[in-house]
Amino acid sequence: MKITYTHTELPEVAKNILGIATSRIFLFYGSMGVGKTTLIKVLSQQLGANEVASSPSFSIVNEYEVADGLIYHFDFYRIEDPMEALDLGVEDYLYSGHYVFIEWPEKIQKLLPEEAVKIEITKNHDGSRTIVIDDSNE
């Protein structure tokens, strides 16, 4: 699925993503500043998180409570070796049954389960964004 949107359309885009997702693991691909954290913030709000999601660039992982569990939000931009993610216990998070949002998943590609929703975000010349959603878990 491919969606082009503006910032004001983000709540509806997030609702659509959550409506079609067959996994609670979401992988966000895209260049720096393209809007990965912004989309995760709105997805978290849609799931009922009371806290405002922010980039876990320095902490690597943030945790948010939602009605039916937790959201784990990872930012692996600073990871140099997948072993660092293993040392953090990433596998426990991935198989916890909770929502897992991962920015820069390419840094730990070999550790990721196949059953995940892949979201590629690109910025368009007019400032809008286009996402391509690959949820081939069906």
Image: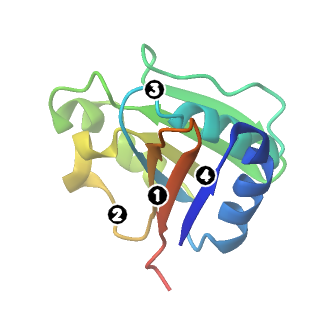
Amino acid type at image mark 4? Tyr
Q: Which residue is mark 1?
A: 95
Q: Please report contact status of discs 1 and 3: CB closer than 8 Å, yes or no.
A: no
* Dot 2 amino acid type: Pro
Q: Residues within 10 Å of mark 2 (few under 14, many from 20)?
A: few
Quarter of the rendering containing residue 114: bottom left
Q: Pointer 2: what residue?
A: 113
SS at mark 2 in the image: loop
Q: Between disc 1 and disc 2, whose residue precedes?
A: 1
Location of residue 119 in the rendering, given as x and y in whole percent from the top left corner: 47, 56
- Residue indicated by mark 3: 33
User: Which mark is first along the chain, 4 or 3?
Assistant: 3
Residue at point 53% right, 72% down?
A: 1
Q: Identity of the amino acid at label 1? A: Tyr
Residue 99 marker: 4
View extreme (bottom): residue: 138
Could you tell me which residue is drawn at 58 percent across and 74 percent down?
A: 22
